[in-house]
Amino acid sequence: MASLAPRVSLSRFFFEPVRGGTLVACGVIVWLLGAAYCHGYQNLLTGSSGDWSGSLMWSAIAVVPWFALFEWSKQPQGMEATRRPAILAGLVIGIAALSIALEYTVHFCVGDVTDRFGLLVMRRLPAVGVAVLLITLTRRAVLRRPPNAATVEIGTIATAIDWVEAADNYIELHVGGRTVMRRMTMRDAEQALAGRGFVRIHRRFLVNRGKISAVAGVNGDRVVKLGCGIELPVGRAFAANLSRVL
């Protein structure tokens, strides 16, 4: 028996929600990068770099919320919401307005209300642009990804399954050279795939008829040959099933 081994890839940070310590680490990195951007921008604008405390505070107010929006967009509720352009635009406007209002409040409390509204908006444009771009690209990439055979209803991926094999209280879905374990009985799998072109050829095997390339042998020595090169035995009690569909 085989199962899919998880692969570590940077793509998981774009396609899957980040949790726990990894989420905290990513948030801190985004926060520091935002502060570095603010520090450099201030230096170019005024010729004076100033201290880092203001840059760190600005990044927490003006950059981190966009990271939070991106992470939320990978959650089921977020994916459903952000796929609608009107809702995504509303979220962007709402977060930007709240961020600007919070920055104005902080400046008012310290008696330093000097930045104009247009400047506050412009300083947020890079973070807004990156967040919206990542949300859009991630959404498109997720839609192009094949369904996860380990989680979806097997009936929805019936055409991709080569054969199903019994494994005690589990079944093995053989999909394009991969093997995925599902906790399900063979009888339940046969019912789920009924009417989808599958034939039971053995007490252990349920085969996609469209994947059969040939049937060889006679009587108890018959085997089914699949297009992928695999040969599966035909049980005597199930030989009639194969004869009917072929």
Image (spheres, rainbow, N blue to C red):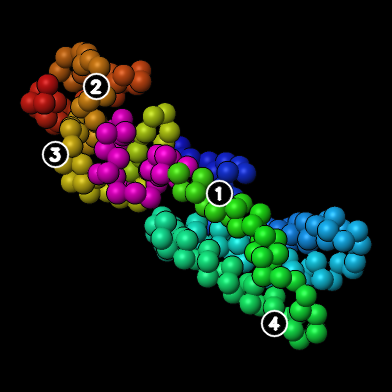
In the image, the segment drawn in magenta is 141-170
Ranked by sequence position, the earlier of labels 4 and 1 is: 4
In terms of secondary structure, where does tag 2 sit? strand
Ranked by sequence position, the earlier of labels 1 and 2 is: 1
The residue labelled by disc 1 is 133
Ranked by sequence position, the earlier of labels 3 and 4 is: 4
Q: Locate the N terminus and report the quarter of the image it occupies.
A: top left
Q: How many other residues sit within 10 Å of disc 4, few (<14), some (14-19) or many (≥20)?
A: some
Name the residue rendered at 19%, 34% in the picture: 198
Residue 126 visible (yes or no): yes
Residue 200 visible (yes or no): no
Name the residue rendered at 66%, 54% in the picture: 126
State the CA–CA distance, disc 1 to disc 3.
42 Å
Q: Is residue 107 left or right of residue 93?
A: right
Residue 195, numbered label = 3
* Front-most of residues 185 and 191: 191
Numbered disc in front, either 2 or 4: 4
Dividing the picture into quarters, in which one does residue 226 lie?
top left
Which amino acid, mark 2?
Answer: Ile
State the CA–CA distance, disc 2 to disc 3.
17 Å
State the CA–CA distance, disc 2 to disc 4.
70 Å
The residue labelled by disc 2 is 212
- Contact? badges 2 and 3 (CB < 8 Å): no
The residue labelled by disc 4 is 105
Numbered disc in front, either 1 or 2: 1
* Front-most of residues 156 and 242: 156
